[in-house]
Amino acid sequence: MKSTPIICLLLVISWLLPSQVQAANERELTTNSAVYLLRSAMRISREGREIALLKAIRQLQDPALSPLFEELAQSPHPVLKVHGILGLAECNPQRKLDLLRIANIEQPSLQAQVISAAMDSGLLSDDEANQLINWPGLDIGIRVLIATQQIQRGIFDKPHILQESSQSDNLAQQYFALLLQARLGQADALPRLDAIHTSDDPLRDRVREMLLRSALRFEMGMIGPWAMHIATEPNVSLSLGLLGLKAAMRFKVPQAQTTWNQQFHAATELAQQTRLALVVLRESESLAPSLFDSLIAQENLLLRNIGHAGKAIASRKAISENVINLVGMENPHPLVSTWALIYAQSQATPEDAQAILLSLVLCYENASPHARANLLENAISAAQTLLTEYAPAAQALLKPILENAQTQPMLLRGIVLAMIRSNSEGAIQLAHQVGKIHDSTSTQLLLLFKAKQGTALSRNQLHKLALMVRGGGLNDDALRVQAGWTYIKQTQQVQSALTRVMNQ
């Protein structure tokens, strides 16, 4: 009888040891996978696998990743260097760029990539832009690039930079400088800009397209008549002509709407009618409501619905109702869905925006199966915008969809992916409010999101996270690398893992 406690103890040890060994093995295998994924982001592959991995790592914006980005920033490869420099700024609490590193890049084209990406990401402050534009020896083309931001913000004070660039032998550089001079009101810039129309340079139309897109992006209304010339030019390519017409409409050139009417009624193919319909839909805020009557009179349902949506926006009446009817068609045009997303994000009132964004989430399920593939990414972006911009409404609107057992699994995963991408307070609150989700992959993704926020995981949850890192039920490398870094942090292996990543 005295041996009984010893026997019990031996039995307990025999039960515990295998699980402990198994846990240690899992920890080692998972850490190895995480290190491999992080290392893969630092290696150029033929398939470009590193791009998605780098973007996913940058999205974490974790200061603990600074050593990895520092290593990337020193890389001779342009792609790695750009992501390294931007990543260092994004994980810096002050979001500060390393200006000295940028200024010391020897290749102007690589400098331009870094600066352009920093501007697009909102990382280049006015003070940093001023320091860079004054940097001795900086390429004139890069100074002009920086000047675009300063001009938009009304703080540009170096006209000699544009003057020098307008004398360049490089056609794109020369005419972009002229465009900026015209934007600043320089009297001779517009007449000089007209000269490109008669140029025999083989790059002429590519440069004109770049100028039109730049004018639209920066709202350079003075270029309207110049754009109208392109829209009505004999033998102009279809795409360039439509882009010119779009700019002319945006900048309220009087004859632009008449020209559109003529072209629409002359079009005999549905494809061309649809292209023209999309032009006026995108510019509907600038147009007369009556312009859309030609579309409303068409037999084709897509054209009719575009007409109703455009007229509603132009007249400021029943906007969300008509836009929802358009995006909710069984077979909506992919570009219509993209337009509605951009309109909701940038032009609609908050009330209309929320209704349209929700409709973009729901229309994925309402669409025919073959149309869904084109709609999922916009549904994800719509959910992300709701979570970021309209948090209380997003929680009320998205929670029932997540908890509904009838919701399509791909849509469930898309909404949780939107939460991960948003990384906003609204997404965090929704993650803790939502109940059971009837899809295992969505449940995995939700666990990843919570773990990224620092939620302490149980042993079972840590096991599920480990499975994600190793690819169990998750074939998206971008999510796996985020799961890998999260696992490293949850298991307190940051320093040792980064040392392995740097030294392999």
Image (cartoon, helix red, strand yellow):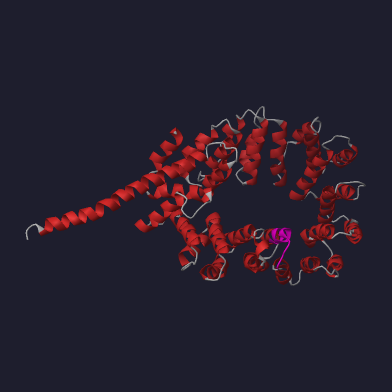
How far across and how far down the image is residue 416, in percent? 53, 60
How far across and how far down the image is residue 83, in percent? 57, 40
- Judge whether residue 449 can be spotted in this image: yes
Q: Is residue 388 left or right of 436 when viewed as pictured?
A: right
Give the residue at x 59% y 32%: 77
Foreground: 294 or 329?
329
Q: Which secondary structure is most common in the magenta stretch?
A: helix
Check the image and report above or below for 464 versus 504: below
Point out the stretch of residues depicted in magenta: 330-340
Q: Quadrant of residue 287?
A: bottom right
Q: Is residue 278 left or right of 259 when viewed as pictured?
A: left
Give the residue at x 52% y 48%: 477
Foreground: 200 or 219?
200
Give the quadrant of the N terminus.
bottom left
Q: Does the magenta-highlighted stretch encompass residue 106?
A: no
Q: Quadrant of residue 134?
A: top right
Foreground: 3 or 275?
3
Give the residue at x 56% y 58%: 418
Give the residue at x 45% y 47%: 485
Check the image and report above or below for 197 versus 398: above
- Judge whether residue 184 can be spotted in this image: no
